[in-house]
Image (cartoon, rainbow, N blue to C red):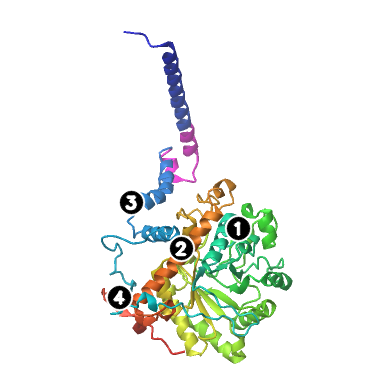
Amino acid sequence: MHLLPPLLAAVLNIFAAFVSLLILLTLIAVVVLYVVDRRQHKDAIRHNFPVVGRFRALFSYLGEFFRQYFFAMDREEMPFNRAERNWVDHASKAEGNTMAFGSTKNLSIPGTALFVNAPFAKLEKEIDEPEPRLIGPYVENPYIPPSYFNISGMSFGAISRPAVLALSRGAKMANCWMNTGEGGLSPYHLEGGADIVFQIGTAKYGCRNEDCTLNEDKLKAITDHAQVKMVEIKLAQGAKPGKGGLLPGGKVTPEIAEIRGIKVGQPSHSPNRHPEISNTGELLDFISRVRAIAKKPVGFKTVIGSAHWIEELCHEINHRGIEHAPDFITIDSADGGTGAAPMPLMDNVGLRISESLPIVDHVLRKHDLRDRIRIIVSGKRITPSAVALALCAGADFTVTARGFLFSLGCIQAMRCNKNTCPTGITTHNEALQAGLDPTEKSHRVAAYCHSVRMEVDMIAHACGVDAARQLSREHVRIVQENGNSISLEELYPQTPS
């Protein structure tokens, strides 16, 4: 038997020494972890099952990722399933979104919307552009949005600079508006040239005094921008109605601090409501005050809990005069999303759009205010069917945040509140942001918006109408507990406006 060459023998000896060292270090680590686990009493599993008990936390952490790719069926995941995410992904790449063999959607689940196709669909040459809807008939600078599908509020700070840039540029290309979210107006919102809806949150970021009251001079400087078309006063959002927010100090960079009007490196709390608004009268007073400064349409965003408050609002408007009405109401759904929210509020508070939108539409019609006040809806409107259903139920416009996040490349990693977003969207880690190219992603944002509108129009033509805004409650049926469907018009009879 030949002896091993000296070089190979040396390599094998080094490898053996390395393996021996690795085994020794592993044993030492196991002993150390065993002692640590036995001595601690915060975690009973780790104390009773030292070392081995640590794998439970590891598997729980990895479970959501493995379920997403290997175990969950296409229609099973929450808050958005794989079929929905894949549709957005293909739409944002302008790829074909056709399917083979048959639908994977269970059409017998109660609440499922089924659109009523006409016996004779509209020919392509009969297709019309959606009827324009003016917002703010009593202001100096009313707004006629070119798109019924738009980008909902996402703050610079909650999402990264390249994400804001991509959305801004994409919105301009798609000819839709972009909402700033409550984090103030940044240069990146303006850079793309899109129409902007400036949102005033409870902390008044960008137009605040230190006590969270409104600074009128700062607001005027913002609304003087020609790109800022409307102002939205945020009372509540779907994921956390009645709850303020917290921007961690680690996210308060010098740039974000300057834009928001807060201190660098210090956490910033948003109150759970506006200090100036404690009742319906004060809400209308605040809307009038902001509108006098902006000279542009002003409305509010909220989550509906019942019809009583909307009735009270309408009574107060008619008492004061129709010009005092908000120019629009943005209704967020109870299943709306955010970067971070308490589970009790996210899971159990507020009404979903399927119930709240018909309620608001009915009450406004009842008080002859429907033509005065435009309705915008938010909350999981990421697919054409969801947008079409909202239009059928009475919406003038729809907005989505998470749909456009998916168009940017979001993989639903559920790390929005950790500053560790792997796609660079909700993190300020520049190494992670490097993978998000605003130029490339802006095209995906625009393609997604175009695809949604195109396929909503396709649904409208199948229902026998010329344009999306002609869809009404007679064009959709809702599956009931017995498996049969009922017309939305029968479930929520529409009061003539």
- Where is 41 relative to 163, above or below? above
Question: Is 432 left, or right, of 269 in this rendering?
Answer: left
Calculate the distance from the C-alpha at mark 4 to the C-alpha at mark 1. Answer: 42 Å
Is the Cβ of the residue at disc 3 closer than 8 Å to that at disc 2? Answer: no
Nearer to us: label 4 or label 1: 1
| Amino acid type of the residue tagged 3 in the rendering | Phe
Judging by the rendered image, the residue that carries numbered circle 4 is 480
396 vs 216, nearest the viewer:
396
Disc 1 residue type (three-letter):
Gly
Q: Specify the quadrant of the image occupied by residue 198.
A: bottom right
Span highlighted in magenta in the image: 32-50
For the view shown, which residue lies furthest in the front direction?
A: 125
First of labels 1, 2 by sequence position: 1
Q: Earlier in the sequence, mark 1 or mark 3?
A: 3
Q: Please state, as top left, top right, bottom left or bottom right, where the N terminus lies in the image.
A: top left
| Residue 60 x %, y % | 41, 48
Q: Residue 137, image x and y in percent? A: 59, 84
Q: Rounded to the nearest whole Å, what is the CA distance between mark 2 and mark 4?
A: 32 Å
The span from disc 4 to disc 3 (Cα, nearest Å) is 29 Å
Q: Is residue 402 visible?
A: no
Rendering coords of residue 317 (x, y %) = 58, 87
Q: Tag 4: residue type? A: Gln
Q: What's the distance in space between the residues labelled 1 and 3, CA to CA?
A: 34 Å
Give the amino acid at mark 2: Tyr
Q: Which mark is residue 157?
A: 1
